[in-house]
Amino acid sequence: LMEKNKKMNYLKYAIGEILLVMIGILLALQVNNWNENRKLRIKEISALKEIGQNLDQNIIQLKSILKSDSLVFHNGEKLIDMFKDENSIYQDTLDTMFGLIAAYSPYNLIDGAYENLKQKGLDLIQDDNLKKCLIELFEQSLQRLEQTGNDFELGIANQRSDLTIAYFETGKSVFSMRPNNFEELKNNQEFFNFLTWTKAAKRLTISHRNYGLNETNKAKHQLEEYLEKIDK
């Protein structure tokens, strides 16, 4: 009987030891998982903060470009009104206005931080909605704005070059053009059509760039809200 009790006590002790070892292993795994998740979260926060800087840079650039676009658009409106006015006369200040016709500022996408994260893996972003938002912004909206938008504006600028050679003095500054004959230019339907076309085209460019700016601001807001939640 005593021998039997000894065996039972030993068995209980052995089971207890095994349970303690298993609990220790589980706790160690849990701590290790917690540490790994913490490291991933730190990397995620760092990457998103860098992307946030890219968003700020794109916002600053787009706002600056839109100011220039607005100046060129309103300059075109004034020229069209002047061409419609039969009593308008040539003034030296018109050289600068003619020089601004079809002027454009190219948009250059800033996405270095996003591209770095792509190489590491976009799954580092744990919020699926934010991940989708950034992918659509950097790989669709802003990319189209850079590629298609710049090509569109450049095409108009090239048309301007042909008209410049035909109707304006050569050798002057790019942003100052003096007409060979102002009165003849006022009655030139081809040139007037070009003025109205550039105005419509610039309006379209402004609309697209405003859309890109709004989408970038939305992404920035969503990113900041997420960072505020996890970066504590």
Image: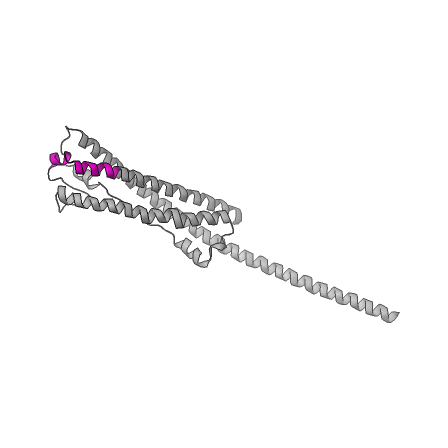
For residue 225, side relative to residue 92 (left or right): right
Q: Position of residue 213 (x, y in %)?
A: 37, 42
In the foreground, 46 or 105: 105
User: Taking 64 as reference, is 7 above or below it?
Assistant: below
Q: Which residues are magenta?
A: 176-199
Residue 11 in view, yes or no: yes
Q: Position of residue 219 (x, y in %)?
A: 44, 45
In the foreground, 231 or 4: 4
Quadrant in the picture for residue 31? bottom right
Q: Residue 182: within the magenta?
A: yes
Q: Main secondary structure of the magenta part?
A: helix
Q: Residue 157: within the magenta?
A: no
User: Taking 86 as reference, is 160 above or below it?
Assistant: below
Q: Position of residue 109 (x, y in %)?
A: 35, 50
For residue 184, side relative to residue 51 (left or right): left
User: Taking 126 as reference, is 184 above or below it?
Assistant: above
